[in-house]
Image (spheres, grey):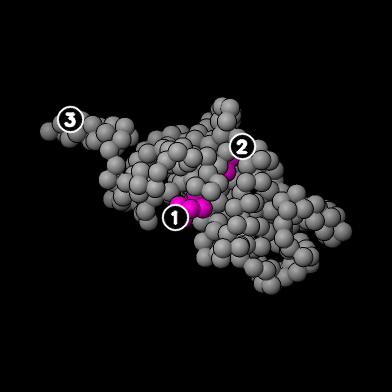
Amino acid sequence: MSEAETVLSAKGITKRYGAVQALGGADLEVRAGEVVALVGDNGAGKSTLVKVISGAITLDDGTIEFLGRPAGIHRPADAQALGITTVFQDLALCENLDVVDNLFLGRELGPWRLDETEMEVQAWDLLQQLSARIPTVRIPVASLSGGQRQTVAIARSLLGEPKVIILDEPTAALGVAQTAEVLDLIERLKHRGLGVVMISHNMADVRAVADRIVVLRLGRNNGEFDAKTVTTEQLVAAITGASDNAVTRRRDRAEADDDEAGT
């Protein structure tokens, strides 16, 4: 794959909660038209990094650039205005509303009244672009499968025409068929030219769609791999901290230097 434009670059991201350091200088780069998997054990800092980038929490140190320019992200609206959208694991859908109402909730067309016809047309058009397997846009979300709900949440995030979409455990608790449906959708997002960040604990799903895999451990980067060539053993080693690579050696040297400076 040719070198694509870097859309999002987060460097040295640090976040503390009192005496607890959730992130200790984490980096993440996302290019147009690629899927980056963000993996690591529970507590590795994945969700914290995503929340910083999405504006849900503010960073303590580090820089975020979007399309090569400094990005002042202090709240979700800032990230969305830039073109960064996040689909969290809970999806935040209203189950009593139908697909159209969920897609346009909070951004209804028409200044004085809801333009139901235009919303329905746009809903169908968007879902067809995504090859969504949803029988009708007037079906209540409560009647949809897990994969279909994930599709609706992703479709809703695309209405603002983002350049980066972050998916938090998009295949969690899904069956085999529903997982395949969501993975196909992620590939379609990539082919639309979006940069996709996928948080997942499922290495099979990661290897199915990711171009690069970024490993976090204890709030820091602990390896970056080509998804097509990395072995399962290498990933497990990086996730658990058993790996000996350039990242871990650089980290160990830096910690040793800090210790010497403090003595």
Instruction: Say whether residue 218 is left or right of residue 148.
Output: left
Instruction: Say whether residue 19 is left or right of residue 87.
Output: left
Q: Is residue 170 above or below residue 143?
A: above
| Amino acid under disc 1 | His
Q: Disc 1 vs disc 3: which is toward the camera?
A: 1
Disc 1 + disc 3, Cβ < 8 Å: no
Please name whichever residue, 51 or 174, is drawn nearer the observer in this view of the structure. Answer: 174
| SS for dot 2 | loop
Magenta stretch?
A: 195-206
Magenta-colored stretch includes residue 148:
no
Please name whichever residue, 107 or 102, is drawn nearer the observer in this view of the structure. Answer: 102
Instruction: Say whether residue 253 is left or right of residue 119.
Output: left
Please name whichever residue, 97 or 216, is drawn nearer the observer in this view of the structure. Answer: 216
| Residue at figure coordinates x 68%, y 48% from the top left | 158
Q: Quadrant of the N terminus?
A: top right
| Residue at figure coordinates x 56%, y 27% from the top left | 3
| Residue at figure coordinates x 75%, y 69% from the top left | 139
Percent coordinates x, y for residue 69 in the rendering: 56, 28
Q: CA distance from mark 3 to mark 2?
A: 43 Å
Q: Which residue is labeled 2 in the image? A: 33
